[in-house]
Amino acid sequence: MALVTGSGAIGGLGHVIAGVLLEAGAHVIITGRNAEAGARALSALPQGGEAATFIHADLAGVDGVRNLAERAGDVDILINNASIVLFAATVDQSEEGFDAAFAANVRAPFFLTAALVPGMRRRGGGSIVMVSSTAARVGINGLAVYGATKGAVEALTRAWASEFAVDGIRVNAVLPGPMLTAKTVASMGTDVGGMAQTTALRRVGEPIEVARAAAFLAGDAASYITGAVLAADGGRTAI
């Protein structure tokens, strides 16, 4: 069973990752805060989502995180994709926004992982894929808080790779570059297209390109890889 958080919106990275995992033969759980959008996202998956399940989940609080873990059951692949992006100058950043970003981007994946690892351990292993960002590696004006949360995500990836290796659980991260999705447009505007010039390939990525990298890390083809951060960013962090 694969659980992909933040996957309840059609065309978003999590939704595309879920589709790739389905095509690889996994049964997939997608999640989101909007039940109606989640139902549409489910039906838009390959084969109409016949091998998928939608769970309505709000990960803003730890109770919601633990409830999701309980309802999801035996999860062998966990994709910690759900996050929020805050675009604000440091001097304008509210305490509420700061706390919300760390709650969604760091606390939620931490406690979801903590809740699901015991089951993976009992079953002899599993695979966890975190989702980082170029903002964790490159200074970007207005993304100080977001970048800090994604830096924490990479720190968790390395710590968990060490901690859970004895249990046969691999932990890796995929690092997406600029992508033209509804989420990035909502947070940064259509100027995300201009970010193409910040990459070595001089183009904005497609969600499917990052999704394939995440699915690779999740699967058996990456059986000797743990603690890695795979940049699927068009060379953004290489230049």
Image (tube, rainbow, N blue to C red):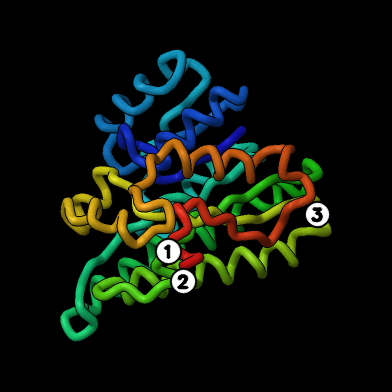
As rendered, which of 189 and 82 lies closer to the eye? 189
Circle 3 residues within 10 Å: few <14, some 14–19, many ≥20: some
Q: Which quarter of the rendering shows the N terminus?
A: top right
**Callout 1: SS:** helix
Give coordinates of residue 87: x percent, y percent: 23, 67
Amino acid type assigned to the residue bearing label 3 in the image: Asp
Q: Image point 38% across, 66% down: which residue? A: 103
* Alpha carbon distance from label 1 to label 3: 30 Å
Residue 122 located left or right of residue 216? right
Q: What residue occupies the far bottom of the structure in this picture?
A: 91
The residue at which mark 1 appears reads as 134
* Alpha carbon distance from label 3 to label 2: 30 Å
**Callout 3: SS:** helix
Amino acid type assigned to the residue bearing label 1 in the image: Thr
The residue at which mark 2 appears reads as 137
Q: Earlier in the sequence, mark 1 or mark 3?
A: 1
* Alpha carbon distance from label 1 to label 2: 5 Å
**Mark nearer the viewer, 3 or 2:** 2
Give coordinates of residue 72: x percent, y percent: 54, 38
Q: Would you place residue 139 above or below residue 82 in this image?
A: below
Circle 1 residues within 10 Å: few <14, some 14–19, many ≥20: many
Give coordinates of residue 235: x percent, y percent: 47, 58
Residue 174 located left or right of residue 226? left
Q: Image point 48% across, 37% down: which residue? A: 17
As rendered, which of 6 and 211 lies closer to the eye? 211
Circle 2 residues within 10 Å: few <14, some 14–19, many ≥20: some
Q: Are marks 1 and 2 in contact (CB under 8 Å)?
A: yes
Q: Image point 71% across, 56% down: which residue? A: 226
Give coordinates of residue 12: x percent, y percent: 34, 40
Q: Quadrant of residue 102?
A: bottom left
